[in-house]
Image (tube, helix red, strand yellow):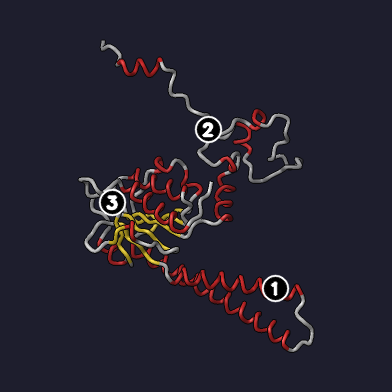
Amino acid sequence: MHDPNPIDVAAKASGEPTFREVGVGPWAQTHPGEDRPDDPQSPNHDSRFDTVLLDEGDRRNVLDRYRYWSVAAIKADLDARGRHEFEVAVENWTHDFNIGSMVRTANAFQAARVHIVGPHKWNRKGALMTELYQHVENHPSIVELVECWKHRISGEIAAAQSQVAAIKFRMRETADAQSSSADAPSADDQAQAEGLAVQLAELEAKIADLQAARIIALDIIPGAVPMETYRFPKRCLMLFGAEGPGLSEKALELADDVVYISQFGSVRSINAGAAAAVSMHAWITQHAAPRL
């Protein structure tokens, strides 16, 4: 029998590690005497709360504001608060754990969608259940994904342009009515005109972002642009491939830009899940305000 490792012995004797408790216990313990929010008769009734979690406690890896909420309620709230405008896609990775890691990171940075290209199943273990809160779509090929994404962008542009036309028509009607009236515009009329001008500016900015949307391949190939100098468009689809071979030739052909992460050691590439995380965070630093 081997003697125990002295480092292990010292570690156990130190009483470490001591970790803070994650999450909350049952509602009755954490909120003694308070009405349960899942009780329809309660004045603080809230349908977002999950009865089982209220009974058993909520130890999930979620923000405190989502404690005891159902999965559907959390996903709906993320949608309502507004997801970020970038999307990510992975092209048939050979290491399934990397896909799960990417889905988890996409949730952390609130990506609009995650696309998985190809027939292979992926191991959800690395996602730590975050795929439940994320929009994850599957595509049979990179061509089908790109076509779907471009059609959606075109549809959003057309919808926004239609809204712009409607607002301009209302603004012309208001202007004509005021020019034919001897009365000065009322405070309500001025407020309405200002509101329409704000809506118009927001829609025109949205259209500009949509028209500038690009497909970005993340790979190390000749002619690729270093991420450190690249300005990510607000609306984009990032493509990731397997760690060794990288993206397929078809994916590189369909991309508008190819970007690489500068590296300074001896290896050619970093872990594919890590590369996705670095890329998403690069977008965040350029377009998203800090948020707790």
Q: CA distance from mark 1 to mark 2?
A: 48 Å
- Disc number placed over residue 192 in the picture, else none: 1
Q: Quadrant of residue 46?
A: top right
Left or right of residue 242: residue 80 = right
Mark 1 or mark 2: name the one nearer the start of the chain. Answer: 2
Q: Nearer the viewer, residue 283 or 256?
A: 283
Looking at the rendering, in which quadrant would you find the N terminus?
Answer: top left
Left or right of residue 233: residue 186 = right
Left or right of residue 10: residue 47 = right
Q: How many marks?
A: 3
Q: Is residue 93 above or below residue 196?
A: above
Amino acid at pointer 3: Ala
Mark 1 or mark 3: name the one nearer the start of the chain. Answer: 1
Q: Residue at x 58, y 55 (%)?
A: 80
Q: Residues within 10 Å of mark 1 (few under 14, many from 20)?
A: some
Q: Nearer the viewer, residue 78 or 176?
A: 176
Return the residue at label 3. Answer: 242
Furthest toward the right, the residue is: 183
Return the residue at label 2. Answer: 22
Amino acid at pointer 2: Val
Whole-percent x and y of residue 268?
22, 49
Whole-percent x and y of residue 49?
64, 42
Q: CA distance from mark 2 to mark 3?
A: 34 Å
Circle nearer the viewer, 1 or 3: 1
Q: Residue at x 58, y 32 (%)?
A: 24
